[in-house]
């Protein structure tokens, strides 16, 4: 026996009116044979609960439904066992093999640019490069993401490395303290924070200041690129540096040039 809705509730960053909560109860009673996933999709469609890209907020809805069940306001269907999908193995080909070493100055490479990777063949090659040459290999990003090739045009067009930006981590104490937001603010605005979770300069590229140049370029163009790809403009980049592997000098160089003040997690406004 479910409880009666008596007031509005805020769940998963969304405020639900009494009418909407009663509607959710009725949907669950009307469609008892829907799976939990199907139920969440149906409720998202009924409430027009979508992202900036008009995709249903499926995970947020599932979280809200589970909270409603704990409050005794709904009875959810049992979770159906799902087959575990095996991640597709990245195949290494000759295209991603190490090339002859390039030892030069930044100026000798000509114009350095960032190319958004969208073409299927380029995405496959990007994945292959990162899987083969990044010490953390390739893992499929969760949520919205954007991939770049770092390019030069001299003596001929060539790829020098890769960048990946994706959804930020849900909770990060240093970042949250620096921003000075509470749980409610974080739930509402976390999508405006993105994470630089892969940065690769190919091991055969030995060019001083190339890494900081690439980061400086991306901070100038990613807001527009993200707007084009995902429908909104982020306001903050965060990243993590494994200090057993790297010093994070290139990040510090970009931050010092901008006159900004990074927090401990090396999150930074751009």
Image (tube, rainbow, N blue to C red):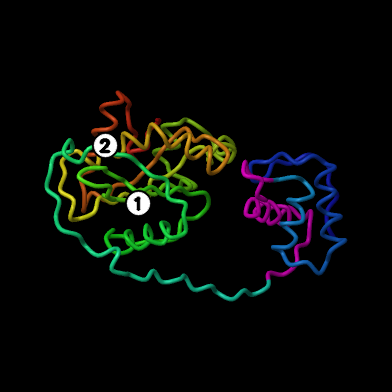
Membership of 77 in magenta stretch: yes
Q: Which residue is found at the position 34% from the left and 34% from the top? A: 263
Closer mark to the observer between disc 1 and disc 2 = 2
Membership of 109 in magenta stretch: no
Q: Which residue is found at the position 15% from the left and 51% from the top? A: 102
According to the image, label 2 marks what residue? 111
Q: Which residues are magenta?
A: 50-79
User: Residue 224, position in %: x, y?
Assistant: 48, 34
- Number of the label disc, if any, that sits on residue 150: none
Q: Using residue 6 as the reference point, say whether residue 227 is left or right of it.
A: left
The answer to the question of whether label 1 and label 2 lie on touching residues, with beta carbons closer than 8 A, is: no
253 w.r.t. 40: above or below: above
How many badges with numbers are in the image? Answer: 2
- Number of the label disc, if any, that sits on residue 198: 1
User: Residue 105, position in %: x, y?
Assistant: 13, 39
Sequence-first tag of 1 and 2: 2
Relative depth, front residue between 93 and 261: 93
Residue lying at the far front of the rendered structure: 156
User: Residue 235, position in %: x, y?
Assistant: 47, 32
93 w.r.t. 250: above or below: below
Relative depth, front residue between 169 and 144: 144
Relative depth, front residue between 177 and 147: 147
Residue lying at the far top of the rendered structure: 259
| The quadrant where residue 232 appears | top right
User: Residue 144, position in %: x, y?
Assistant: 52, 49
Q: Locate the C terminus and report the quarter of the image it occupies.
A: top left
Alpha carbons under labels 1 and 2: distance apart: 23 Å
Q: Which residue is found at the position 77% from the left and 46% from the top? A: 47
84 w.r.t. 155: above or below: below
Dot 1: few (<14), some (14–19), or many (≥20) neighbours within 10 Å? many
Q: Secondary structure at mark 2?
A: loop
Dot 2: few (<14), some (14–19), or many (≥20) neighbours within 10 Å? few
């Amino acid at each position: 026996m479910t409880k009666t809705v008596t007031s509005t509730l805020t769940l998963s960053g969304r405020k639900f009116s009494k009418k909407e909560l009663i509607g959710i109860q009725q949907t669950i009673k009307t469609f008892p044979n829907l799976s939990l996933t199907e139920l969440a999709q149906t409720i998202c469609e009924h409430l027009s609960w979508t992202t900036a890209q008009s995709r249903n907020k499926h995970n947020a809805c599932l979280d809200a439904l589970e909270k409603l069940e704990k409050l005794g306001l709904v009875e959810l269907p049992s979770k159906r066992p799902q087959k575990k999908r095996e991640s597709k193995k990245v195949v290494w080909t000759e295209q991603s093999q190490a090339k002859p070493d390039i030892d030069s100055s930044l100026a000798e490479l000509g114009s350095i640019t960032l190319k958004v990777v969208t073409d299927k063949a380029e995405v496959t090659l990007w994945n292959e490069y990162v899987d083969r040459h990044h010490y953390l290999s390739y893992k499929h990003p969760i949520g919205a993401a954007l991939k770049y090739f770092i390019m030069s045009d001299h003596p001929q067009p060539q790829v020098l490395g890769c960048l990946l930006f994706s959804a930020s981590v849900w909770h990060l104490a240093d970042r949250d303290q620096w921003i000075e937001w509470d749980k409610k603010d974080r739930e509402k605005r976390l999508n405006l924070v993105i994470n630089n979770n892969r940065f690769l300069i190919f091991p055969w590229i030995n060019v001083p200041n190339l890494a900081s140049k690439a980061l400086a370029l991306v901070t100038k163009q990613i807001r527009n690129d993200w707007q084009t790809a995902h429908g909104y403009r982020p306001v903050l980049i965060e990243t993590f540096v494994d200090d057993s592997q790297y010093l994070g000098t290139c990040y510090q160089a970009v931050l010092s040039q901008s006159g900004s003040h990074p927090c401990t997690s090396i999150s930074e406004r751009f």
